[in-house]
Amino acid sequence: MTSDDAQFAATQNKVARDRLRNAIPAPDELKAYANQLPPIYRDILAAVQQADPNRVEGEPIALGTIRNTLLNKGTQLTDPQLELAIGKLVARGFLDQSDFPQWFFTPTPVGDALITTITGASVKKASIPDLPNPTWVG
């Protein structure tokens, strides 16, 4: 494989991942998918919600917070297992990973929908009041 081929494949993977991360399936499709997930992935996604039940859409969560939430629930995962599983959730478009610091993750729209399906708890939408129009502009 040439470097051009590798770059093309990487671009195609990114396009596919971006398409998945923004496509919200129907509730029955999400439920069927959630039911197929191995427990490690369900536990990690549930831990995102359980770590901060008041989490607002778009807020990142630290890997250490996910790890501690899992430990407090009695879920025994090694650090390499947790990192591999989260890496797969990122690769499938359910989580985004921060560029810096690297160990922060934000659920994508489809990731939030899957977390809601697994936990039954909806993520809160960020909202602020509208900014009024300046009175000095006609």
Image (cartoon, rainbow, N blue to C red):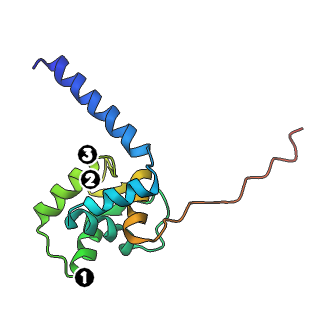
- Depth order, front residue of 111/105: 111
Q: Looking at the picture, which amino acid does disc 3 mark?
A: Ala
Q: Looking at the picture, which amino acid does disc 2 mark?
A: Leu
Q: Give the spatial CA distance, label 2 vs label 3.
A: 5 Å
Label at residue 91: 3
The x and y percentages for residue 6 are 17, 24
Q: Nearer the viewer, mark 2 or mark 1?
A: 2
Tell me, yes or no, whether the two marked residues, 2 and 3, touch with CB atoms within 8 Å: yes
Rendered view: 123 above or below 101: below
Tell me, yes or no, whether the two marked residues, 1 and 3, touch with CB atoms within 8 Å: no
The x and y percentages for residue 78 are 11, 68
Q: Give the spatial CA distance, label 2 vs label 1.
A: 22 Å
Q: Give the spatial CA distance, label 1 vs label 3.
A: 27 Å
Q: Secondary structure at mark 2?
A: helix
The answer to which quarter of the image holds residue 43 is bottom left
Find disc 2 in the rendering and name its residue.
89
- Residue 108 seen in the figure: no
Find disc 1 in the rendering and name its residue.
72
Q: Secondary structure at mark 3?
A: helix
Bin the neighbour count of mark 2 within 10 Å (Cα to Cα): few under 14, some 14-19, many 20 and up: some
Rendered view: 100 above or below 70: above
Instruction: Please identify the quadrant where the N terminus is shown.
Output: top left
The residue positioned 28% from the left and 46% from the top of the image is 92
Q: Looking at the picture, which amino acid does disc 1 mark?
A: Asn
Please report whichever mark, 1 or 3, sits nearer to the chain's N-terminal start: 1
